[in-house]
Amino acid sequence: MAKITELPQASAVTGEDIAVIVQDGVTKRVPRRVLVPDAPDDLLLTDRLLQLGVGGTAIGEGVKLPQEKFELWNDITLAEDTTMVTMNATDSGAALNIKKMFLLFVGSFSAANPTLAAYYNAGELYQMWHSFTLAADTTRAVWVYSEKIAPGVFRSLYCKAPVVSGSPTDMSIQGLSTTNADVMSDVAARPFTVSVANATRWRFGLVGSSASAVMRAGSRIMVWGVQDNG
């Protein structure tokens, strides 16, 4: 019998192949599926020595796991004073079905201490409702991040205080200082309402006692996100 080192190398294996083992000094044949259990179709673990043989992945292709990439959905510079901005599609025209979203506002407001809100759909899923201590017509940045954790359930984080920033043109913002290092958090849930199981529109602007104020023309809103394709 040829030595193991003299045997040809297998380029691919399946669960029906036979492996050779030595047990108690006796050479025996063992079905490969006994040595290597089946794996889910969405998890392929392969390296130079081991292939699970699911989905036809070649040896050496490594671990395949889903990847999520944030894309720039909207880049809006206000052409006029505006109280609320609403978007249900990306700038390229793709309809929104929001899984994760990060919104950055850099601009100013006509009134001091504005109350701002960020929410989805017609207002069933609020991601932020917060009053900021801020002088009128002073450029500052505000951000909010949210992600879907179940149908109709979103959790969010947003800045507790406005962030010192540069002009809306370059969107430069200073590293977080003591006054805006903390974040607020919230959970918006309508899990039993089918009509709001998905978030297909985002809205951002002034609400409550600030509803008569405006975001100044020239202010800029940028939104990055991940679509819910599942």
Image (cartoon, grey):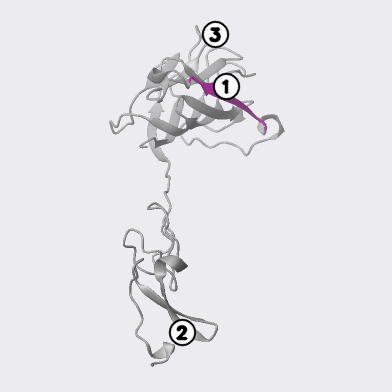
Q: Residue at x 54, y 29 (%)?
A: 155
Q: What number is the disc on residue 198?
A: none
Please tell me which of labels 1 and 3 falls first in the chain: 1
What residue is pinned by disc 1?
Answer: 138
Three-letter code for the amino acid on which mark 3 is drawn: Gly
* Image coords of residue 197 (percent x, y): 41, 24
Q: Visible in this render: residue 122?
A: yes
From the viewer's perspective, tell me whether residue 82 is left or right of residue 109. Answer: left
Q: Which residues are magenta?
A: 182-190
Mark 1–mark 3 Cα distance, whole angstroms, equals 20 Å
From the viewer's perspective, tell me whether residue 106 is left or right of residue 197. Answer: right
From the viewer's perspective, tell me whether residue 54 is left or right of residue 47. Answer: left
* Relative to 180, residue 46 above or below: below
What residue is pinned by disc 2?
Answer: 27
What residue is pinned by disc 3?
Answer: 208
* Relative to 162, residue 18 above or below: below
Three-letter code for the amino acid on which mark 2 is drawn: Thr
Main SS of the magenta part reads strand
* Image coords of residue 171 (percent x, y): 50, 35
Mark 1–mark 2 Cα distance, whole angstroms, equals 81 Å
Q: Residue furthest right?
A: 178
Three-letter code for the amino acid on which mark 1 is drawn: Thr
* Image coords of residue 153 (percent x, y): 50, 26
Q: Residue at x 34, y 77 (%)?
A: 10
Q: Residue at x 62, y 39 (%)?
A: 175
Nearest to the observer: residue 20 or residue 201? 20
State if disc 3 and disc 2 touch (CB < 8 Å).
no
